Amino acid sequence: MDHYDSQQTNDYMQPEEDWDRDMLLDPAWEKQQRKTFTAWCNSHLRKAGTQIENIEEDFRDGLKLMLLLEVISGERLAKPERGKMRVHKISNVNKALDFIASKGVKLVSIGAEEIVDGNAKMTLGMIWTIILRFAIQDISVEETSAKEGLLLWCQRKTAPYKNVNIQNFHISWKDGLGFCALIHRHRPELIDYGKLRKDDPLTNLNTAFDVAEKYLDIPKMLDAEDIVGTARPDEKAIMTYVSSFYHAFSGAQKAETAANRICKVLAVNQENEQLMEDYEKLASDLLEWIRRTIPWLENRAPENTMQAMQQKLEDFRDYRRLHKPPKVQEKCQLEINFNTLQTKLRLSNRPAFMPSEGRMVSDINNAWGCLEQAEKGYEEWLLNEIRRLERLDHLAEKFRQKASIHEAWTDGKEAMLQQKDYETATLSEIKALLKKHEAFESDLAAHQDRVEQIAAIAQELNELDYYDSPSVNARCQKICDQWDNLGALTQKRREALERTEKLLETIDQLYLEYAKRAAPFNNWMEGAMEDLQDTFIVHTIEEIQGLTTAHEQFKATLPDADKERLAILGIHNEVSKIVQTYHVNMAGTNPYTTITPQEINGKWDHVRQLVPRRDQALTEEHARQQHNERLRKQFGAQANVIGPWIQTKMEVLRKHFICCIDEIGRISIEMHGTLEDQLSHLRQYEKSIINYKPKIDQLEGDHQLIQEALIFDNKHTNYTMEHIRVGWEQLLTTIARTINEVENQILTRDAKGISQEQMNEFRASFNHFDRDHSGTLGPEEFKACLISLGYDIANDPQGEAEFARIMSIVDPNRLGVVTFQAFIDFMSRETADTDTADQVMASFKILAGDKNYITVDELRRELPPDQAEYCIARMAPYSGPDAVPGALDYMSFSTALYGESDL
């Protein structure tokens, strides 16, 4: 084989020693080459459904030789001659040799005649030349190629293994550990390397050959006995067999790389799907909380007592202080998560996320607005109900007092009016009875106002829907019925006395005068006692001062009242003097009245005792109103500072940072520097706002004190706690949304590779055409902006169709406006490359090999379990003519992942 070996080694490997060339004639070497080259050829010919048995005989007609070259090169050779004559065979072999020469291989001393004649050495030399060109020449490892590259690859792979030292392709492989180390390095589960022994080469070689043939699809090209029994195994046979390991494992490496690329795409997609599930759950929980809360806030069922209504007010304060703030944070976080998810989907060229029906951000905002409206109405209703119950309690107590006084006065009056004492009375007694009756009528008339007041109070309690109205109405009706009966009885008795009056002429004027003066004075004292014991409700210093002034005026009338009392008592004393002087039989009582001096003195003493009590009550109420006024001033002073502070911060945020959530692009006008500088400035601004929270909490505490004191108005400030809360929540939400938008722009800029100059140019163009400073562009404004940036959008049907396509990208929800975020996403999409559907399909193509499908087993072997199942669930079954069980159409995965538009 010297006549072809020297030329090939000059082309592909270092020169060999003369001893090596001489050994080529060794029958043992020839046997090894014949077996190895035959197995190598059959490993490729079987792809075409054929094989060879005798290497020098089966290639003589050139047909299988041409077929072998077509299989290993993937190219079509010239049409072979089908004749069996020598000239036809030589023609076919020449076509094969010409094809080898066209690949840059110089064939020296190898002619078609020698191959057709079955020259074994020439045939083996030709096959070795083919192996060098198509199996070894293209091997490249760390800037070395061919034989050196293959040797370096073997050394790198076997370096970690003890007792393995690969220095050549002959004696370094005799103990079999080199072959076992290559297999264990790539497929450690196939060989238990720790149990191998260097002194048992036959076992090592047979183990490696059997495992390679069974699990790696590498045919058995060598015999262990031939290698062990030869002092120096054939180098070409060893190189040929080792190159099969290289190609088998390098193909596995490419498949691993392709699998990693697919895993990366799937990991991003799974993360986005998890974010979508998290959004749906958070949105559902928030909407469910709003759904449960609104009916509670809309419940206007009144309570019957102040204590119950105050408990409702306390529950409402707990809702405001404990339950609502976390939900405000959840709502803000939900919007931030939604924006971040949409940004990630745009950066991955995925369709925009559309939440389930009723769970859009706008739906949540609408539901939140309904919650706020119900909350506002509920608070107003609570305060009105407390005022109503307070008024009702006051009226009910007043009704009970007046009714009790009246009932006490009417007690026994009906029986008195029904007496027949005038039938057996003397003339003086009749006159006394008549006068007494006249005094009673005066008393009755004086009580008419009280009865009317009782009826008016009962009517007002009914109008205010007092819970115990039936009892009040029954008592009022009883008083009115009794009053009508008293009037009828009074009239009937007067008629009887007047009939008898003609018989009686003598009348005791002094008793009569006593009765006439004692009755009004008694009514005055009862009225005074009633007024002094009457409860009062005031809400301001001015009201309590008015009551105090009226009380002082009342005390000023006491000296005159005392004079009247003494005058009335003087009349009674005069009567007693006359009775004692003239021994008049008066039975010890005044016939004209039941009011005794003792009763007058007792009531007078009671009035004198009630006056200082009234003084004390008015003084305590005056002190309470002063305390309430201090609370008003304290709250007003803080609210007048915090309210303008919040307004100022909102104005600063609008003027110096951003005018609306989608107007982030205009920060460049008010804030200079990079997006990171702007983000840092915004976070410092947010920190300064959060540091103001203790003052808000202090104001909340003052507001709670005001509510506990039942203070309903405050003239010292126009700010209410509700205004402060709403302003504070809007301020926190606005700065959080602003920071999120800037973070998303940084994410977009970094992912798309947009420079700061490009970002500034996009901002300037966007702001220039945003005429109304709304932070968005209308369709015509957006078209003008694109034209200013160099887009050619003609005013013809084709141009309108192109612009409609662009609008479908930047305004997928068809709102009729383009935000700055959508604008820069579109511009970045035009200027940056992303992982496309073609790249993913190329990766699947590597895994599939030369097939038009990929099997379930291949996916499960090359991909992690969860991602393999993810792909299997999204691929359609392959139905081509070459389909096998478990075959999947991997092209359908692109449609499921990217949609038809990206294919």
Image: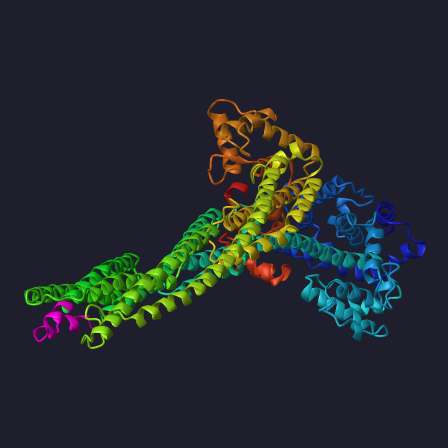
Q: Is residue 593 left or right of residue 756?
A: left
Which residue appears farthest toward the right when viewing the image?
18
Q: Is residue 619 left or right of residue 522?
A: right
Q: Is residue 260 left or right of residue 724?
A: right
Residue 43 position within the rendered picture, expressed as x and y whole percent measured from the top left: 68, 57
Question: Magenta part of the protein: which range?
Answer: 412-432
Q: Is residue 357 visible?
A: no
Residue 687: say if magenta: no
- Magenta stretch, overall SS: helix
Considering only vertical position in the picture, is 27 above or below 348? below
- For image coordinates 59% across by 52% down, the residue present is 696
Residue 387 position within the rendered picture, expressed as x and y whole percent measured from the top left: 39, 56
Q: Quadrant of residue 202?
A: bottom right
Considering only vertical position in the picture, is 714 above or below 172? above
The one of 563 and 334 positioned closer to us in this rendering: 563
- For image coordinates 56% across by 40% down, the residue present is 661
Considering only vertical position in the picture, is 627 above or below 92? below
The one of 252 and 85 positioned closer to us in this rendering: 252
**What color scheme is it?**
rainbow
Q: Is residue 675 visible?
A: yes
The one of 14 and 118 positioned closer to us in this rendering: 14
Q: Quadrant of the C terminus?
A: top right
Residue 629 position within the rendered picture, expressed as x and y whole percent measured from the top left: 52, 52
Which residue appears farthest toward the front when viewing the image?
581
- For image coordinates 71% across by 55% down, the residue present is 253
Considering only vertical position in the picture, is 804 above or below 84? above
Residue 430: say if magenta: yes
Residue 488 position within the rendered picture, expressed as x and y whole percent measured from the top left: 12, 64
